[in-house]
Amino acid sequence: DAGVTQSPTHLIKTRGQQVTLRCSPKSGHDTVSWYQQALGQGPQFIFQYYEEEERQRGNFPDRFSGHQFPNYSSELNVNALLLGDSALYLCASSLFQGGTEAFFGQGTRLTVV
Amino acid sequence: AQSVTQLDSHVSVSEGTPVLLRCNYSSSYSPSLFWYVQHPNKGLQLLLKYTSAATLVKGINGFEAEFKKSETSFHLTKPSAHMSDAAEYFCVVTENSGGYQKVTFGTGTKLQVIP
């Protein structure tokens, strides 16, 4: 079992550009959540996908969007990148029924210059 | 409303001495509680979880935590710190409400282990 895999591991983008981050959940999991972790901060919830729909959303602007595919994998898209979007983006997979732990990927380190 | 408070942003201990990382929570429902560890530039690894079974929970690497409902606490302990324990630790609470799972992270505690 490969666990949660994220790609790419590192990424450098220019202000104003768009970026897509990818996540494959742990085998058997049906829910994917995305978090943004700025340097020295705890993870902040962006949104959660289940059955290919956004189920919950944190306090992030519409520039942040996502998608979940039938195989449960997910993408996070960020448009019109700002310097403040530089962070570690973490993907977590879990079962929608809850009460179970979320498994995290190693993250994608996004740097906006 | 659901919230998590990690009472110490930094904790420093000597190698071989006990570790105590404090976490208090509030939840309107029966929560599940977790501790995760994050080593520098890494993702989060689950240390242990409480999901309404035994109140004393044992995790990996010798860590354990006790769920105390009366004190709304879920403190993380380890009898003897090892250098490899130096990392950041996050207390997490989840609850199911209205068919959705709400997840809240604490702000984290950085553990320094002094040789």
Image (tube, rainbow, N blue to C red):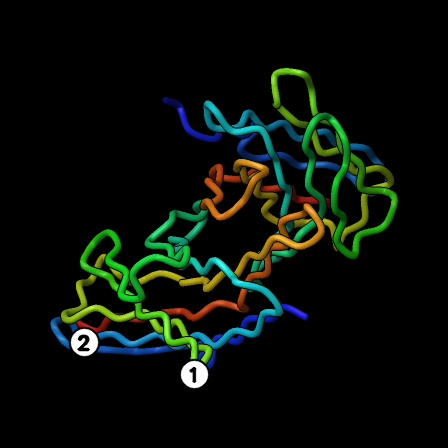
Q: CA distance from mark 2 to mark 1?
A: 21 Å
Quadrant where the N terminus of chain A sits is top left
Report x, y in % for residue B2: 63, 68
Please rate how many residues cluster around mark 2, counting C-alpha atoms within 10 Å: few if below 14, some from 14 to 19, many from 20.
few
Disc number for residue B18: 2
Dot 1 alpha-carbon crowd within 10 angstroms: few under 14, some 14 to 19, many 20 or more: few
Q: Residue furthest left?
A: B16
Q: Residue at horizontal 34%, vertical 57%?
A: B53
Residue B112 circle label? none
Q: Quadrant of residue B55?
A: bottom left
Question: What residue is at 43 percent from the left and 83 percent from the top?
Answer: B71
Q: Is residue B48 above or below residue B28?
A: above
Mark 2, mark 1: which one is toward the viewer? 1
Q: Position of residue B35 (x, y in %)?
A: 40, 59
Amino acid tagged 1? Glu
Q: In x, y percent, where is residue A68? A: 70, 25
Residue pointed to by mark 1: B71
Question: Could you say which is closer to the camera, residue B82 or residue A80?
Answer: B82
Q: Answer with left or right where residue A47 lies relative to residue A33.
A: right
Give yes or no for contact between labels 2 and 1 (Cβ–Cβ under 8 Å): no
Q: Secondary structure at mark 2?
A: loop
- The chain holding disc 1 is B
Name which residue lies at 33% across and 54% down. Answer: B48
